[in-house]
């Protein structure tokens, strides 16, 4: 009985106090963040450091970085030659750029 109560409280908390409720990524801000911080290495979804690991849809899928969460994690923490942006960008900026990258990958990096 106690565990049912905890589950119900958890669900109610998520539904009514979810900090991401109604959150929509600002793709315009994501584009600006990308242009300022990422484009030097990733112009057009390419990768000048590791050419096989692009931001193109097929590469993101092959490297299991094809969700907003996975991209957000990599932008925040960095990996290999990519620096971590967790201390440089706000959480909302990272969320926006992750959504921008995934949107561009879906579009084939064509504006």
Image (cartoon, rainbow, N blue to C red):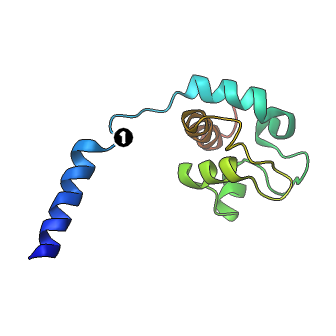
Residue at position x 84%, y 57% in the image:
52
Query: What residue is pinned by disc 1?
Result: 19
- Give the percent coordinates (x, y) of residue 38: 78, 36
Residue at position x 19%, y 66% in the image:
7
Q: Is residue 41 left or right of residue 98?
A: right
Image quarter of the N terminus: bottom left
Q: Residue furthest right?
A: 49
Q: Quadrant of residue 35?
A: top right
- Give the percent coordinates (x, y) of residue 101: 64, 40
Identify the element where label 1 is drawn: loop
Q: Quadrant of residue 81?
A: bottom right
What is the crowding at mark 1: few (fewer than 14 residues within 10 Å), some, or many (at least 20)?
few
Q: Nearer the viewer, residue 84 or 69?
A: 84
- Give the percent coordinates (x, y) of residue 36: 77, 26
Q: Is residue 15 left or right of residue 26?
A: left
Q: How many marks?
A: 1
Tell me, yes or no, if residue 111 can be seen here.
Answer: no
Tell me, yes or no, if residue 77 can be seen here.
Answer: yes
Residue at position x 33%, y 34% in the image:
22
Q: Nearer the viewer, residue 58 or 51?
A: 51
Q: Residue furthest left?
A: 1
Q: Is residue 94 left or right of residue 87?
A: left
- Give the percent coordinates (x, y) of residue 29: 60, 24
Residue at position x 52%, y 27% in the image:
26
Image quarter of the C terminus: top right
Q: Nearer the viewer, residue 18 or 57?
A: 18
Q: Quadrant of residue 90?
A: top right
């Amino acid at each position: 009985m106690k565990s049912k109560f905890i589950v119900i409280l958890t669900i109610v908390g998520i539904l009514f106090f979810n900090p991401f409720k109604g959150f929509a990524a600002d793709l315009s801000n994501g584009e600006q963040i990308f242009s300022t911080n990422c484009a030097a290495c990733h112009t057009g979804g390419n990768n000048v450091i590791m050419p096989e690991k692009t931001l193109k849809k097929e590469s993101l899928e092959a490297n299991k970085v094809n969700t907003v969460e996975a991209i957000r994690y990599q932008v925040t923490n960095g990996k290999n030659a990519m620096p971590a942006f967790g201390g440089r960008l706000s959480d909302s900026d990272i969320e926006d750029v992750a959504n921008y990258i995934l949107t561009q990958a879906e579009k084939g990096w064509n504006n």
